[in-house]
Image (cartoon, grey):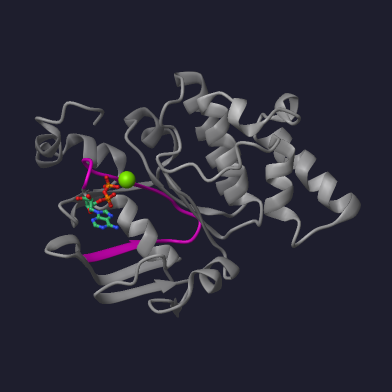
Amino acid sequence: MAILQTRGLDKWFGGLHVTDNVDFSMQPGEVHCLIGPNGAGKSTFFRLVLGEHLPNGGAILYDGADITRAKSYQRIRRGISVKFQVPGIFKALKVRQNLQIALQDHLSGHSLNEEIDRLLEFLKLKDAAGQLAGSLSHGQKQWLEIGMAIALKPKLLLLDEPTAGMTPDETHATGEMVQALNADGVSVLAVEHDMAFVRQIAQRVTVLHFGRVFAQGTIDEIVADERVAAIYLGETGHA
Ligand code: ADP
Ligand code: MG
């Protein structure tokens, strides 16, 4: 059974068909990358999965349940977590305090501190624990974002452009974090532009173009697909 599946998912913003009859599926334990040019509808797809937007048509199934109309908090409670493109960390608070906020409704006292320490270690932020989140490097901010998203141990983690603005070393370290989470049983769906990173983490890749599923396959199949290469021609930014 798929951990996440959409059937005929449709979303319109006014006259713009942002998600066009999307049939998507990924298996539990999979790392899946969602790629496609800017404006293809990738972030909107994430917001539909989290319930921040309701679709105009189609269905979303998660872990065997129809969550199409479920509230966001119900989806989060069932184990879906998202790191969005737009930063959601508290810049005026210390790194440690950010993680505390993510965890404090679930843990307290010694176990809260222990879990924060474990996360800081995992995120390579131990030495920055007392720094204001706003003073972190771009890559470290992304890691803190990921930390906020994984604090409650999701089953399905959606990462929207996790390596944007990172150095190659930071990108590689992020790939290792994703692999470690995946080895722990977390299914991961990541929007990503860096093909080396996609190759590092993804078992399968879906290409979105103008809101439609344009291609699906392994990274090797996608890279070899001339139709996919063609949709990036004329893009001045990253692939
Ligand atoms: P991507 O993440 O692939 O770059 P998005 O999902 O952010 O694409 O956006 C897809 C299209 O939908 C874009 O044309 C964008 O301008 C439009 N869009 C996104 N969110 C909204 C919104 N809340 N209202 C209106 N249009 C939107
Ligand atoms: Mg986006």
Q: Nearer the viewer, residue 107 or 155?
A: 107
Residue 110 visible (yes or no) = yes
Q: Residue at x 24, y 75 (%)?
A: 56
Question: Residue 57, relative to residue 180: is it above or below?
Answer: below
Residue 24 as seen in the image, left or right of residue 86:
left
Q: Which residue sits furthest right? A: 110
Question: Residue 215, relative to residue 97: is it above or below?
Answer: below
Residue 61: percent from left, percent from top: 40, 74
Q: Residue at x 52, y 24 (%)?
A: 170
Q: Residue at x 38, y 57 (%)?
A: 46
Q: Tell me the magenta residue range.
A: 22-39
Q: Is residue 25 magenta?
A: yes
Residue 120 as seen in the image, left or right of residue 156:
right
Q: Which residue sits furthest front? A: 92
Residue 176 visible (yes or no) = no
Residue 209: percent from left, percent from top: 17, 49
Residue 101 as seen in the image, left or right of residue 80:
right
Residue 223: percent from left, percent from top: 22, 35
Residue 212: percent from left, percent from top: 17, 57
Q: Residue at x 23, y 64 (%)?
A: 22
Q: Which quadrant: the C terminus?
A: top left
Q: Which quadrant: the N terminus?
A: bottom left
Question: Residue 172, relative to residue 189: is it above or below?
Answer: above
The number of discs equals 0
